[in-house]
Image (cartoon, rainbow, N blue to C red):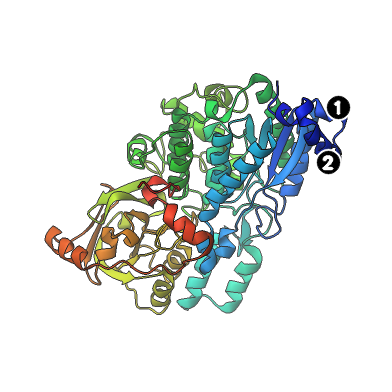
Amino acid sequence: MMKSDNVKKGMQQAPHRSLFNALGFTEEEMQKPMVGIVSSYNEIVPGHMNLDKIVNAVKLGVAEAGGVPVVFPAIAVCDGIAMGHIGMKYSLVTRDLIADSTECMALAHQFDALVMVPNCDKNVPGLLMAAARINVPTVFVSGGPMLAGHVKGQKRSLSSMFEAVGSYAAGTMTVEDVCEFEQKACPTCGSCSGMYTANSMNCLTEALGMGLQGNGTIPAVYSERIKLAKHAGMAVMELLRKNICPRDIMTKEAVINALTVDMALGCSTNSMLHLPAIAHEIGFDFDISYANEISAKTPNLCHLAPAGPTYMEDLNEAGGVYAVMNELSELGLLNERCMTVTGKTIGENIKGVQNKNPEVIRPLDNPYSQTGGLAVLKGNLAPDGSVVKRSAVAPEMLVHEGPARVFECEEDAIDAIKGGKIVAGDVVVIRYEGPKGGPGMREMLNPTSAIAGMGLGSTVALITDGRFSGASRGASIGHVSPEAAVCGPIALVEEGDIISINITECTLNVNVSDEEMAKRRANWQPREPKITTGYLARYRELVTSGNRGAILEIPRK
């Protein structure tokens, strides 16, 4: 019996069949599995404008393999366009909207299987969360990354674009220079070309076992991407025949594999919000401190933008995610028995995949560092943890001590940075930007880019209870938990307090006595919420802290 028989077979379902007739279903189609294709196509996100072609290719693959493809939509926000204004409050919050709405559509209509077609930022983890909840055979195929831009003979990407604005403020770039970047930094459709959040999550979908080889790296404009989409449609029908479901694939071991690959690739810090959220859907209580355990034994093999001069197209040519995983397997760092959407195990998938460019994927005897790309820092400023992309931090900033420059929102910090009020050695603190405080946990790409553009990237740190774009680089420490809105220690920091950062030893402290902090806590007053209506108000009431992945939970009475 097929799941879709609940809406297609029997006398009681005669009204349902009349509605399928209205859809133009034939008698023959009514006998076949109904496969939902979750299309994230829209005309506002560059990474999603080509998804109509991916969806059409998936439909062909499903039909070829004996299924009936049925398309329904999912939303997606372009974080780049949403950056630096109220729109960014509406980015992270969509992850859970996407998961919830996809769950509703899939279960309301009783699909037998699903193909998820995401691409950018929250769309990928949102659909992975939904896949775990719905638990019917599911394959992911993304829209693919953008090709890098070329400016003045160098490959460039969106992070260089944001930094160009900071360089202009510093007087080191002309209007004409900025305009040239503007015209050339983002030359094609696709998810932005560095190892930012979208590409991080699409690569980790391969590592989790939920996407076919190349899902994370084949450029959006390559015909190979269309072929991949057809194969995804065929693959889901094979999974249906074998009854292999997401929870057979997305196990605790698979999540740990994904975290290991994350460390080797140097993924976006946002993965430390999304992996815990995905883990939560399979009943795995993912503590972000796992990151340091995994990092301690996992070498960082890739320095893609913004950490280095290589891009997703280079990683693809070098052998992609499977080549990175094959390197890690030599150290015995992966659980190779984990099942995947190919119907084979991780070990079977990666066997014999070659690293074709040791400059893009460093071999094990020449890593960028012996430890992974991310680190979780704890201390009296972040008792529940904070996250930094260690691979994108200048060596001289791995250990840093400096005075706190405290700002109550992102906009005030940007004004101070561009106004030359932030100097070498300072530690910029931006608070009340956490999941509840924002609400919505905005990305701080504008301030980190302004710091880099002003030439302060190797002398100034930034700490926030908000989060960072994958395009951020430098000593950018986010997800500070507990956040300011619930009187986390970051709410009690005062201008001039000395903050000690030690990324090597994974610590983050403010040099203030416990007694003084207790005094400040006693005098602290909660802030009135800036937003009291609509989705954000509901989100604020349900969202947990950054260290738990900013998941939504009904408050316990």
Residue at the image position 16 percent from the left and 61 percent from the top: 518
Front residue of this view, candidates 92 and 406: 92
Residue 56 appears left or right of 219? right
- Give amino acid for label 1: Glu
For label 1, count other residues whose C-alpha is less than 10 Å away and answer few (under 14), some (14-19) or many (20+). Answer: few
What numbered label is drawn on residue 28?
1
Image-quadrant location for residue 131: top right
What numbered label is drawn on residue 23?
2
In this rendering, the answer to whether 415 lies above or below 536 is below
Residue 190 appears left or right of 252? right
Front residue of this view, candidates 217 and 26: 26
In this rendering, the answer to whether 65 lies above or below 298 is above
Q: Is residue 195 visible?
A: no
Q: Position of residue 403 (x, y in %)?
A: 24, 68
Q: Position of residue 28 (x, y in %)?
A: 86, 27
Q: Is residue 466 visible?
A: yes
- Give amino acid for label 2: Leu
For label 2, count other residues whose C-alpha is less than 10 Å away and answer few (under 14), some (14-19) or many (20+). Answer: few
Image-quadrant location for residue 320: top right
Front residue of this view, candidates 180 and 478: 478
Q: Position of residue 85 (x, y in %)?
A: 52, 69
